[in-house]
């Protein structure tokens, strides 16, 4: 995939903001899902099974993490206009900072949009354990959002990463279907 001559925009998004949807819809977007790098998913046979394994007990950590994730991220910079990554302040930020990876913006739901995200998790097949974990993570992330040195975008009820980028297209590369 050839990107435009503009540098790659790296956006971090909380679970459910629409990273995967955006990457499936637009060819100049890569969703660099962290789970396959963080966990050993060698027992998943079909991609459609992926969401239900998120947050499940008994997973084994991938011993190559975080180097495998950071290497894949660096390998794809310049190949896409957008690379979408996870936005956990405590787990992801130290790795981005250590490797001088600039995150252009962090997208997290506003407090009044959180119920929409819970519905979204169930609709896409996540387990109850995953939903509970994301609620806890959200509270942690929301409280620590001021520790992030880059711009924070709070997505309001009904707003997604896609709708935000389209609405603010003057400051971002054009999404290419």
Image (tube, grey):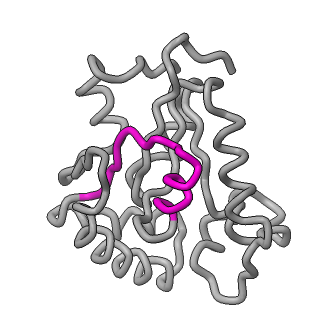
Report the side of 86 relative to 172 (left or right).
right
- 93 part of magenta stretch: yes
Residue at position x 31%, y 46% in the image: 150
Residue placed farthest to the top in the image? 5
User: Which segment did they paint magenta?
Assistant: 92-109
Q: Position of residue 165 (x, y in %)?
A: 32, 31
Residue 29 lies within the magenta run: no
Measured from the top left, where is residue 155 in percent x and y?
Answer: 24, 50
Identify which residue is drawn at 53% across, 79% down: 127
Which quadrant does the N terminus fall into? top right
The image position of residue 25, as x and y in percent, is: 53, 32
Is 94 on the left-hand or right-hand side of 161?
A: right
133 or 104, nearer to the observer: 104
* 25 shown above or below 61: above
At a point 49% along the width and 78% down the height, the residue shown is 130
Q: In this rendering, is residue 174 above or below 71?
A: above
The answer to which of 9 and 97 lies nearer the viewer is 97
């Amino acid at each position: 995939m050839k990107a435009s001559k503009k540098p790659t925009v790296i956006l971090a998004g909380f679970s459910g903001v629409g990273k995967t949807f955006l990457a499936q819809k637009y060819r100049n977007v890569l969703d660099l899902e962290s789970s396959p790098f963080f966990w050993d998913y060698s027992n998943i046979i079909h991609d459609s099974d992926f969401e239900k394994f998120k947050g499940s007990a008994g997973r084994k950590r991938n011993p190559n993490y975080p180097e495998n994730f950071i290497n894949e991220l660096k390998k794809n910079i310049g190949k896409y206009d957008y690379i979408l990554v996870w936005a956990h302040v405590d787990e992801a930020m130290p790795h981005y900072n250590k490797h001088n990876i600039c995150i252009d913006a962090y997208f997290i739901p506003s407090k009044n949009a959180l119920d929409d995200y819970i519905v979204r998790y169930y609709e896409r097949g996540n387990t109850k354990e995953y939903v509970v974990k994301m609620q806890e993570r959200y509270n942690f992330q929301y409280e620590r959002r001021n520790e992030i040195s880059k711009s924070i975008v709070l997505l309001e009820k009904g707003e997604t990463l896609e709708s935000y980028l389209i609405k603010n297209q003057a400051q971002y590369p054009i999404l290419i279907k």
